[in-house]
Every structure is written in C-alpha cells, then in structure tokens.
Image (cartoon, grey):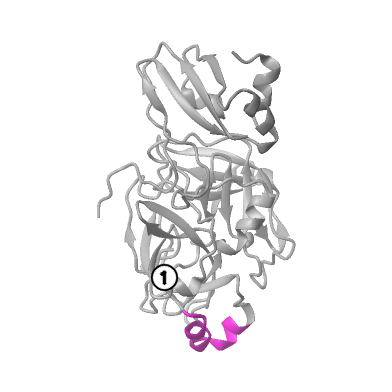
Amino acid sequence: MVGRRSASMLQTLLTVCLVVYSSVARPAAAQGCGQVQVTKQGLIFGGSASTPGMWPWHIALMHRESPVRTSYKCGGTIINKDTVLTAYHCVVENQQPIAASRLIARAGVFDLDLGGNNVQDNRVFEVISPPGASAQSFNDDIAILKMATQFTFNDYVQPVCIRAVQQDISELVGSYGTVVGWGWTEFGSTSAILRQASIPVVSAEDCLNSDRVLFSQVLTTKLYCAGSRNGTSSCNGDSGGGMFFQMGNYWYLRGLTSFSAVDVKQNGICDSNNYVGYTDVSKYTTWLQQNGVRFEDPLLTSTPTRKPAISSENTTLIRLSVNPKMKKFLQQQKGNVLLRVSLNGRKVESLFQ
C-alpha cells in the first residue's frame, strides 16, 4: 500500500492500476466525446428541426445585459466539463469585449422559450482569445470560454470530439457537415427550437469566385467556406455554433460559424444563397493545448487514453496515465502500484474531477 507521500506523487507517469472498493452498485461507464445518448428522430436557414438531446454539445451563449434582462447571443460547443468554444465576435459588443461575468453558457436546451428540466446554466469565468482576434475582419474568430462551475454530463449535455491530428480542409471538400442553431430562418424570424442543416464544404477557389469582394478580404488559411447556395445556410444568430462531421461512431467539431454575405434585400440579414465562412478549429489545436484545453480524439489510437473500467463485483480497476517524471519511482515498484480507496457512497467518477 502506498503512503500519503507516494500517493500524491502518483498524480503525475506510465500506467497505474487503481483498485476501488465500493459497497454500492458499479456506476455506468463514463461517456466519451461525440456520442448522442438519445434516440434520433428524423442558423439554420432552410434546415429542419432537431430533437432534444440530438446535439448535446451545442449550447446557447446568453448575454446578461442588465440585472433584469438576459438575451440569446450566439451558439457554442462543449469541449470538456469546464470549456466551451465559440466565435470571438460573439464575446464582443460594439467592438468592446463583453465581461466574462455577463456571459452564461446554457447547456441541455432545445427550446429557448421553454427551457426545461435538462437545462444547465453555467456562468463564464474567463474568456481567452488569440492575440490577433478581430470582430471586424473575423481574423482568429475563436474564443475559449472557461466555466465557473463544471457541466454535469448526462443524456442532454455531452462534449464533442476534436481531431488531434492535422487534416487539410481540402480533404473535406464535397463532404457534408451539419450545422445547428437558433438563428434566422426562411420564415423571417429566429427559431425558438434548435434547427439543423447539412451543407457541403467547398474549395477556397469556389468560395472566392462566388463573391471575390467579400471573401478576398476575409478568407485566410484559418477559415473555410461551406454551403449549398440553395437557401439552406447558417444565418444570423447561428454564429459561434459548430459545424460537425461524423467519423466512425463519433461526432467531431471542425468549424465555428463566423460570417456570411448580407442579403441586400433584407437589411442586416444573411444571404442564404451564398457561402458561409467558418473558423477552422483544426488550425487552433496547438493554441487550445497551450491554454490548457483538454479535448478527446477517440480515433487517434496512438494517444494514451483512459481504458474502460474492468469490474468484478464491488472492485473496479481503472488505468491512469501519469507523468514520465515518476518513471523511476514506478520502476522501483516493479511497474504496478495498488492504491485502495474507500468511496463512502460516492461515484467512481468523483475521484477524477
């Protein structure tokens, strides 16, 4: 048995086996990223209604404008228990940053008007953006929102996956991703219920040729274009929400809704027959890691991940990855260290929060 001093050192190297004894029934295995837990049934302009729990990583970013008024601002995506990604221009008002304390991430919501028992409101504690972020040029249009408290993952609140390896966007040209949001619809108003639309990624060349005046000013290697140019599109109010691709059994975040052309016939409303610009999240994975953002990529088999719990009656074995600084210590212990922990009625997951 490892003493206090040695146990504290185990937070950081190779593989440690943790034996947990509990007098309560074994909890269900922890849910990974990018997996929908409810049954699917059957911005978005020209899209269709989704169903509750269909996009459990999508949140409504609310702006507390005054003590008595809170309004919907943008969409966002849950990356882990205390982190949301959104567009930088979503955390700016009149070219001035919105104070983090005035932002609320509303998770588990389907109908903005009704709310519901599945809703979790988490206050934003900190907003982190790249040094070059601009709400005018849409350069580096991405922001990390750190929560004051953690989300409670359940069927209606889950994290999405992010690819940990670089994949050039040209490889996805012609592929359809899904965008979701409560934005402007073809009915001439924003939507109270979450809607979805499937749209294809297009090449930078096609994007530029469609509207050279607009896209030549803002299109960079950190942005990509998508759309069908048939009236189905992200639109006003969908900003900050994700564009998701299903790979294997997992949903991955690739883009953040950033900007679009304006319909000259409708003042300030998007042109749903034009392409939309999306921030390419894959270009920011190093930046995310530098800012302490943890994300999962189940398809990356070479990345050490926590293996499923192996249980036998009231004993649960959990494998942990620890820091190489402890390599010498574990080698002295011949590879395996057993730590006995009393749960006292708590869930196993509580040991890792």
Above or below residue 56? Residue 323 is above
Secondary structure of the residue carrying tag 1 is: loop
Question: In the figure, 202 relative to 165: above or below?
Answer: below
Front residue of 331/217: it is 331
- Could you say which is closer to the camera, residue 328 or residue 169? 328
Magenta-colored stretch includes residue 129: no
Q: Is residue 11 above or below residue 54?
A: above
How far across and how far down the image is residue 299, in percent? 44, 52
Q: How many marks?
A: 1
> Could you classify mark 1 by the number of other residues whose Cα lies within 10 Å: few (under 14), some (14-19), or many (20 or more)?
many
The magenta region covers 203-216
Q: Quadrant of residue 198?
A: bottom left
Q: Residue 88 lies in what quarter of the image?
A: bottom right
* Residue found farthest to the left: 42
- Identified at 35% across, 69% down, the residue is 46
Return the residue at label 1. Answer: 233
Task: Tell me which residue sits at (62%, 60%) in the image.
Answer: 284
| Residue drawn at x 50%, y 58% as measured from the top left | 241
Based on the displayed image, in which of its 4 quarters is residue 184 positioned? bottom left
Q: Is residue 183 above or below residue 106?
A: below
The three-letter code of the residue at mark 1 reads Ser
* Image quadrant containing the N terminus: top right
From where the camera sits, is residue 270 visible? Answer: no
Question: Is 206 contained in the magenta span?
Answer: yes
Residue 350 x, y percent position in the rendering: 52, 25
What secondary structure predominates along the stretch shown in magenta? helix
